[in-house]
Each structure stands twice: as structure tokens, then as C-alpha cells.
Image: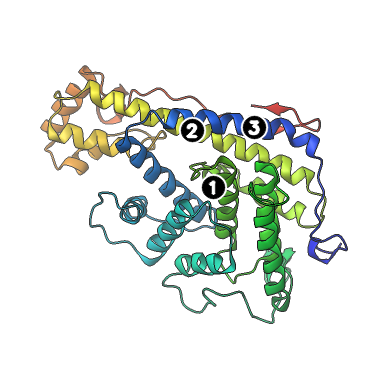
Amino acid sequence: MPWNWQQPGWPNFTWDAVRLRQAEERFLIGSGEFSGVLKHLTAEDRERLTADAISTEALTTSEIEGEILDRASVLSSIRKQLGLAADRRAAKPAEQGIAEMMVDLFRSFAAPLSIEMLFAWHRMLMSGRSGLAVGMFRVDDEPMQVVSGPLHAPKVHFEAPPSTQVPEEMERFVRWFNRTGPQGEAPLPALTRAGIAHLYFESIHPFEDGNGRIGRAISEKALSQSQGQPGLTALAATILIRRKDYYAQLEAANKDNELTAWLAWFAGIALEAQQRTAVRLEFAINQTRFLDGLRGQLNDRQLKVLLRMLREGPEGFTGGLSAGNYGSITGASPATVTRDLADLVAKDALRRTGEHRYARYFLPIALRSVPQVEIDASGCLAG
């Protein structure tokens, strides 16, 4: 079977808009609710939420590709890029590069997409990497393929257009993206446009490396434009949770130009990501109330540990905080650690499970669970 770009209809995609209607409506409602709550945050809380959301997306979009970055370094780089207070932590090129790209995406969400913008993102993303064509489309004569399996019997999951076709394909893609935006001559609904944009870009696969991260950034840009404000949607974080399915859905969709199944899957992911973002917003609000309620009751060590735990976001420390963690963060002696933790529990600043060396401590901030969202054949939503 030929790839989608080899078929006569390329790139005139088709889909069942009726099946996506309910999802599109829910996304618009959720966007409005999020904007309303965001207005009630203090400037400090908005800055913290923005930096944390961007850093989470930077980390998770990299992890989807198998690249594990240091959270503290990425967050520090993003805070510096945003002009916020940050430590002097040195970041590696990969961490600095993804931070720069994600902040540029955040700031330039409303600007039209351009080839120059994509080249700039690629230069940021590939900072410090050698042996690649950086800030330019691929030029290799060899086929660009996504493969797995042993060398003697590889499985080809996808093959992109030849490099000689890429400039023309990308010019057409950029025109399509701008024409289908909220201010374009042929606007598309938010989830539909973001889903098509991702698959369309990935099908061209214009760069030697970094296509997945840039493709997800383009989807984020599309969602932000539909909301009229920089997006904080946890799209990459949600895709990471569904990574195996994500690749399977992409592989299935790159063989056909009828995209209903792909768009229904993507819409479910985007709605789930929106709910995950809402949970983070609730966490930011509850975090402020939590700290306000403890004002003047904590010593410097206790405050340092609580702030460190809060920086981990709604998920908190994996497995909870241990006495060893507390000692490592504060440098306190075992006896001081024991007293501090007992005092935090007594003040309802932490909740303890287990005893003695098995004791673990958790923040007492309740969180809503985020259900998986699926769209059935009729367009009805689950979750």
C-alpha cells in the first residue's frame, strides 16, 4: 500500500466532522473555563504556573523521543527565558535548546507559521548536536524511514517524501496552516486543525531529527491560536502516557488521507490534556492557600522542603518523601529531621504513611483524577 503522500488525494484530507463536533464543543467550553479561572490567580501564581507548564511540556515532549532531561535545569532555563527569578544552574545544550524553543512557541503563538520560524526552532532544538543538517530541511538522498527490528529484517513503519520534494511540500504545509487558522480564509475547528497539522507535518518529516518535537509544538501553536492566548495544554505530557498508542495511531494514519480515526483519537488526547491542565491550575490555587495557611509556622528547613515538593507538581515525589530525602534537601541531622517531620505532620502540612524507615510523607492537597477520554464511532465522549 502506498504512503499517504503517494496517493492521488494528497494532501486533500477528508474526515467526518459530525463525529468530532461534541469534542470540539467541549474543548471550547473548557478553554473558556480555564481562561476565567486564570484571571483570578495572582501575578506570581500565573508566572509559576506558566513556567511549570512549559517545563513539563519540554520534558515530556523530549521523553517521548527517549531523551531524559534534568527537570531542575530545564525549569531554570525557562524561568530565565521568561525573565523570571531563577537559580544559576548551568543547563546542557539539549536542555537549553528545548527551553528556548518552548518559550518562543509560548511567546509567538499568534504569529503566522513560517519556514524561518521552523528553522529557528530546529536550530534551538538541535543546539550542540553535531553531524546533522541544522536549521534546514533534510537533503540526504537516502529515503527518510521510520524503522524498527533487526538490521537483517527491519520493519518500515513509514517512509517520508524524498528530500527533493520537501521544500515544496513545506511551503504548501505552511500556507495550509495559516489559511486554516482563526483569522485565515478557511478556518477549521481547533482540535481538527491541530490534529491534521501534526499528522501532515509528520508525514513530510522535513528534518533529519526533531520532527516529533516540532510537530507537537505546531499542534500546541494551533490550539493556542484557537484559544486566543498562549497555550498551557499538557498535550505532550498526555501523549507520553499514551506513547505506544500514539505511535500506533500515527502509523495507521500515514497510509490513508481519510483522517477520521486519527482525528478522533487526537481529539480525545487533547481533551484529556485540557483536563490535566485544569488539575494543574487547581493545584496552583490550592498550593497558594496551603502555604498561606502555614505562614509564620514553619522553620526555614521545613519551608524549603515543602517548596521543593510543590515544585514537583500534582504528581509530587514518586513514592512520597522519606526522611532521607528530607535530610538530603536540608542537610539536617537525623534527630532534626525526625523533629521537623513530626511537627509538619502535627500541623497537617504533611500526611504520613508507614512507620519508622518505611514512613513516607505526602502533601495534603487533594487532586482530581484525570480520566482517559475516548470518542466512540458516533462521536460520543467517554471520560
Residue 283, quarter of the rendered image: top left
How far across and down, in percent of the image, does residue 35 sit?
Answer: 48, 33
**Where 383 falls versus 151 (above or below)?**
above
Q: Which sits earlier in the primary sequence, circle 3 or circle 1?
A: 1
Q: How far apart are marks 3 and 1 (CA)?
A: 15 Å
Q: Which amino acid does label 1 sit on?
A: Ala
Q: Nearer the viewer, residue 14 or 156?
A: 14
Q: Which residue is drawn at 62% across and 34% down?
A: 27
**Where 122 falls versus 322 (above or below)?**
below
How far across and down, in percent of the image, does residue 124 sit?
Answer: 45, 66
Q: Which amino acid does label 2 sit on?
A: Ser
Q: What residue type is labelled 3?
A: Val
Image quadrant holding the C terminus, namely top right
Q: Which sits earlier in the primary sequence, circle 2 or circle 1?
A: 2
Taking the image as shown, residue 31 lies to the left or right of residue 76, namely right
Sort mark 1 into few (<14), some (14-19) or many (20+) by Cα contacts within 10 Å: many
How far across and down, in percent of the image, does residue 338 sit?
Answer: 16, 28
Image quadrant holding the N terminus, namely bottom right
**Where 140 falls versus 91 (above or below)?**
below
According to the image, label 3 marks what residue? 373
According to the image, label 2 marks what residue? 35
As helix, strand or loop, the secondary structure at mark 1 comes to helix
Q: Can residue 323 be seen in this view?
A: no
Does the CB distance between marks 3 and 2 fall below 8 Å? Answer: no
Q: Which of 180 and 323 is in front in this view?
A: 180
As helix, strand or loop, the secondary structure at mark 3 comes to loop
Q: Which sits earlier in the primary sequence, circle 3 or circle 2?
A: 2
Image mark for residue 236: 1
